[in-house]
Image (cartoon, rainbow, N blue to C red):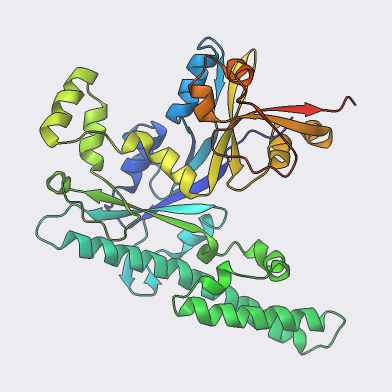
Amino acid sequence: MAERGPAARAAIIGTPGAGKTSLFCALSGMEYARAVAAAGRVMGAAVRILDPRLLEAHEKNGPHKKLIAPSVEFLDTPPIEIEEPGRPHNPGVFAHLREADGFVVVLRAYDAGEDRRRAAAAQLEALRSELYLADVDVMQKRIEKLRGELKKPGPAADESRKEMAVLERLSEAVAGGDVRPVLELKEEDEKKLRGFQFFSRKTLIPVVNIAETDLADPPRPTPDAICVALKLEAELLAMEEADRTSFMRDYGLSALTLPGLAAAVYDRLGFQTFLTLGDRDTTGWALRKGSTAWDAAGKIHTDIQRGFIHCEVVSFEDFRRHKSAHDAAAHGKQRIEGKAHPLVDFDIINIKTAAR
């Protein structure tokens, strides 16, 4: 059976007081006191991605059946104290972050008496710079090692010289804040450098912790930043639904951000979901965007991938318009696709395999 662990690992980072641990608790359901007691250490929790479409499919396929959802592991990390540009107070924290697939950067923007948009932008730039400088440090150390090896000619000298040239180019670019060369590596270079887990190759997702007074016009430092009044939303989510609805109306909120934030992170990390509807369960499978039916088969089981003949596909919108996937198929809404077919988010699939 294919592995069903978390699809990705997202590290939550931020400066002291940003609301990093509050966000971790809101996502994971962990008690705040327990998380605070572990201050200074990395804590992780797998969070299920309960997209409304998955819940809708589960209800239609049979609410009594088992629901299996994809998940993301969120990491609460020690705060990063930046005393001056380029000199983090606790550089050791970066050692815990290399295995993360991306970063949720919590930005403090709730203090009165300051330009909160500018403050959030400054924090984002400072934290991004620290991550990039940590990459430059790793690159420089590797370059020095390669220079030492090249003083002793050997059969691997040509490869070492090529790697050093690539790293020197990347180091110069990243030190200047330009990560495009790191993201646009040739395949052969990408394979050689994959083990370094460079931060500059990973997704940064800004989450701005805003004040209640800024709900109507949040201080968004970048167009893609997610703004949320963490304290307020946590209090609202703890209320009975009727009370919550009343208070949300008072604050002018039509919807809360926290319930959908894990799904937003999952999406920005580059994942989509495909569904299989069984007699005993409804399963949402995590799949990289742009992946094919062949890739999806491998997620389910390696034997299914090896025996792949074709894939029966029903789009979620067609499924939604009918009683079931079988009903959609009976109305001509099922397509037969081959291995190379790129799946769309929330496609419902059934893979036909050769007998083995």
The residue under the point 70% across, 66% down is 187
On screen, 206 above or below 88?
Answer: above
**Closest to the observer, 222 or 133:** 222
Left or right: residue 184 versus residue 109 is: right
The x and y percentages for residue 88 are 38, 68
> What residue do we see at 50% from left, 71% from top?
179
Front residue of this view, candidates 116 and 224: 224
- The reply to whether residue 240 is visible in this rendering is no
Point 52% across, 82% down: residue:
172
Q: Quadrant of residue 231?
A: top left
Q: Could you say where residue 321 lies in the image, as x and y percent from the top left?
A: 48, 21
Residue 89 as seen in the image, left or right of residue 303: left
Q: Is residue 303 above or below residue 99?
A: above
Q: Nearer the viewer, residue 214 or 19?
A: 214
**Most foreground residue, 171 or 344:** 344
Please give the count of numbered marks on the rendered protein.
Answer: 0
Q: Where is residue 133 shown, x and y percent of the image?
A: 47, 73
Q: Residue at position x 64%, y 33% from top?
A: 4
**Looking at the image, which residue sits at the far front?**
332
Res 270 seen here: yes
Quarter of the figure with the N terminus: top right
Q: Relative to 201, is 169 above or below?
A: below
Locate residue 127, reporting x and y percent: 38, 64
Which residue sits furthest top?
64
Which residue is outermost to the right?
356
Specify the quadrant that holds the C terminus. top right
